[in-house]
Amino acid sequence: MDFSRIDWRILGCSAAVPAPNQYPSAQSLRVGGTLLLLDCGEGTQIRIREVGLRGASFDVVLITHLHGDHVFGLPGLLSSWTLQGRVKPLVVVGPRGLPDFLHGINAATEGSWSYPVQFVPAEHGCVLENDDVRILAHPLNHRIEAWGYLVEERVAPRSVDYEAAVAAGLEHADFRSLQLGLDATTRGGHRVPNASVTVPGRHGFRMAYLTDTRYEPALADFAQGVDYMYHESTFLARHQALAEKTGHSTAREAGLVAASAGAGCLVLGHFSQRYARLADFAAEASAVYSGRILVGQSGLNPLAAAE
């Protein structure tokens, strides 16, 4: 599949308390010309610089929920962008309470932002759409309000066969409607069937980001057929009771959701620091999911790792 327009980095995927080389949840995802930040735990702005990204170039921030290991890095990041003179608008999607959280810190510190910030409340369905991406949200099953996100690359359903189109008498101005599947008419009035000058378009990248949540079978329908599923796996099955109590999933449960969704690749993350061997998570998930499994680590590029 052609995912040349995609750049995906895991900046951090550890649960709860930060530790050396174990950073809380944060991921960057570039789809075409749109750069997304998914969650923003402590140290995210440092990780952004370490992987060579220009932090102030982010267009959209997606926050799953207001637990600290997913959001405590955001106030500092937004403040740093002001110090860097950012003027580009920013879209922030997240649960109720996120605007009050950020505005409250600004009020307490007499801070402000040098750029417009548009807050979009997370709700079931499409929360953002532009020329590059379509982003959908789905409620998760956690201890507080939490949301999973599905990021879909927008691609034209058809690709124009340039030589055939020109030979048929069409011009560049006709190509956009052809990509959308419409027939065209030459300047001389001759109708050109779409199928005669186009071929099916390429497959667009689709990724589900599902953290933090108890085992929730309905997420498989939400993420049906995704190329990649990032699903939290805070615990191994021997700590099933603790997973249910704290609102998290085991690696086996992550595998069950990925299998039911028919996901092309499962990326595990949000690991509890009680475990020394991350390979155990992949082994447990592989018992119920036969697809490709990656163990998330800080700095991982899942697209490159899956090749």
Image (tube, rainbow, N blue to C red):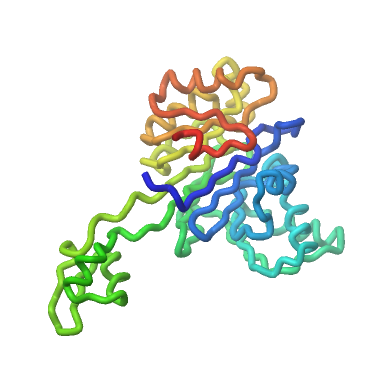
Residue 219 sits in which quadrant? top left
**Residue lying farthest right?**
109
**Foreground: 226 or 53?**
53
How many labels, in total? Answer: 0
**Residue lying farthest top?**
238
Please identify the quadrant where the C terminus is shown.
top left
Residue 146 sits in which quadrant? top right
Q: Residue 151: image x %, image y %?
A: 47, 50
**Foreground: 223 or 218?**
223
Q: Which residue is at a point 56% across and 54% down the rendered structure image?
A: 122
Q: Is residue 139 visible?
A: yes
Q: Residue 111: image x %, image y %?
A: 83, 63
Q: Residue 113: image x %, image y %?
A: 75, 65
Residue 30 vs residue 260: left or right?
right
Q: Which residue is at a point 62% across and 49% down the rendered structure image?
A: 63
Q: Is residue 145 visible?
A: no
Q: Which residue is at a point 19% across and 70% down the rendered structure image?
A: 183
274 is higher (above) or lower (below) than 106: above
Q: Which residue is at a point 60% across and 18% down the rendered structure image?
A: 239
163 is higher (above) or lower (below) than 26: below
Residue 166 vs residue 28: left or right?
left
Q: Residue 142: image x %, image y %?
A: 59, 37
Please identify the quadrant where the N terminus is shown.
top left
**Residue lying farthest bottom?**
188
238 is higher (above) or lower (below) than 304: above
